[in-house]
Amino acid sequence: MSQAGLSFEQAPPLGAPLRLFLIAPWFLIAAALAAIPLAGDWTANRWTPAALGLTHLLTLGFLGTAMAGALLQMLPVMIGSPLPKVRPVAWLAYLGLALGSPLLAAGLAFGLPALLDAGLIALSIAWLPFLAAGAASLARAPALAAATRAGMRHAWLGLAVAVGLGLYLGGGLTGLWPLHRPIELTRLHAAWGLLGWVLMLIVGVAYHVVPMLQLTPPYPAGMTRWLTPLLFASLIVYSMLALLPGSPIVDLAAWLALGAPIAWFAFATLRIQNRRRRKLPDVTHDFWRLAMACLLLGLALAPMALFAPEPRHGQAQVTLGLAFILGFAVTVVAGMLYKIVPFLAWFHLQAQTQARAGTIPNMKEMIPDAAARRHLKLHATALLLILPAPWLPAWLSAPGLLLLAASGYALWRNLHRARRLFLQYGGRLG
Amino acid sequence: MNAIAKLLTADHDHCDELFAEAEDATAKQDWDAAARGFADFHGAMERHLAAEEATLFPAFEARTGMQGGPTMVMRAEHEQMRGLLEQMRAAVERHNDAGYLGLSETLLMLMQQHNMKEEQILYPMSDQVLGDDAALVESLDQAIHPA
């Protein structure tokens, strides 16, 4: 039995994930503010340059940074195997995403090949070492915790396919090579990025953190065993169907194949949360419930996004994307940051200073509940106003977008407060 | 063979149950119930931590030769838990519910990420290398379930 990879150290130092967590909200703010003058474009159709640019600000800038940061921390805990060379990998992810996300987004939104080129190079520098380190970590993980490892492997593959297709499509747009079937491959890029990576990772993490944090019953054993393989198989089938000539039957089959496991996950999460033993109000719990409601809303919109005639077809697709990215993924990530960041700040501070428990701020002093709850209210109100934006006059999206920017700022301020206290009490980030 | 994982994972669940009861009573400011609930929780936690430190970890270290690795990290986290538990006891005595809830939130995260590492990796590995040692399982059982 190999034990070479077994390590429970809280690697890496706090600075590595925290840097990624603290830059994420700025991309939410940037996306919200940039969306105001571009509202006439992105609300109409997901294929518009503005929609493509804004989507990447959210998926790479917010979700990419936060999820990469979380994984640096979670792999040792969940599969007993840290990322090798975690410090340089974390730095490259940080620099590559911080520069590459806005460059790529601007290149897509304004059709500027020079920015696209620079963005693609920066994003390669972010993701390729991260994928390589992830592969090494997964390969070295002890042959235990099989379901968790399987989920992480599927998510890794999802990211690898999304990054590979993204580089291919981006390189084609800047004229590096001719593009074959760009429309179909863009759909696949989105499906693998959003479902294969984002959703798969959230599901794999949810198996552990939902029961852990609220003391709920575990997810049903059949589900933890079969859901991520089923989702993965559905994605492969969807990918093959997507390359065939489009037909309503194929679209319907794809919706059912992908929708059924997603609905299973959302309902199972809501059900076990209802049976939680820890009944206290908890802001992360509320973020999760909002996220599950948005995930189900996205599923309910899918038939319209697939089958309705224009313009409802395009409008439903934009709302579906908003429900999934902003409503589901951003919400889950924000909720998780309210557990991860104050805990890590406390944990590293205690370990570094050997302070007695009462002499350093505890988690709720690092980020008070009331402050996190203010953010939740801003975020939920922003969602309520933004989700119907494609169906309304473009200027009506501005109030919701301003609230979204305020929500991003509230998130940053709350996370930054934990960093400030950590340093104030003598913590070292490096 | 999964006797060690089964026994100690069930004890984690038991501790979680007691944690939730004590926290609930504290949040309701039902101080008699909180004092009783916390004492039960604290006792169960201490038995669990001590059983691992006195029985499981030395056997694991002796069998695998891993002295400074996973068990050292586990022992360090046990000490962090004990620090929080002491502060929580003081908070119950002073009827300081806000202080208790901040500490209990912190303990829960610490405890759960710790338990995940044990349940995902350390216990299954212990079963692989020690699972045939029925006397060890028996003494763990006795240590966490006092007569």
Image: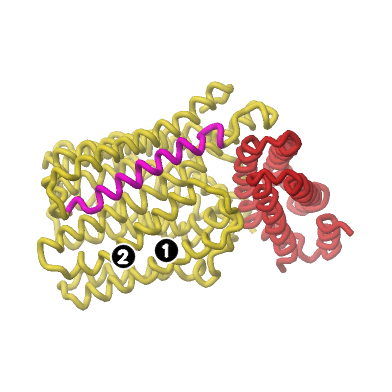
Chain colours: A yellow, B red
Q: Which mark is on residue A266?
A: 1
Read off the magenta span.
A364-390
- The percent coordinates of residue A75 (x first, y second) are 52, 49
The crowd level at tag 1 (other Cα within 10 Å; few <14, some 14-19, many 20+) is: some
Secondary structure mostly seen in magenta is helix
Mark 1 and mark 2 in contact (Cβ < 8 Å)? yes
Q: Nearer the viewer, residue A262 or A111?
A: A262
Badge 1 amino acid = Ala
Residue A223 x, y percent position in the rendering: 49, 69
Question: At which x and y percent is residue B47?
Answer: 80, 50
To the question of a shared chain for discs 2 and 1, the answer is yes
In the picture, which quadrant includes the N terminus of chain A? bottom right
Inspect this view and state whether residue A326 appears. Answer: yes
What's the chain of the residue with tag 1?
Answer: A
Residue underneath mark 2: A299
- Chain letter for mark 2, please: A
The three-letter amino acid code for the residue at tag 2 is Leu
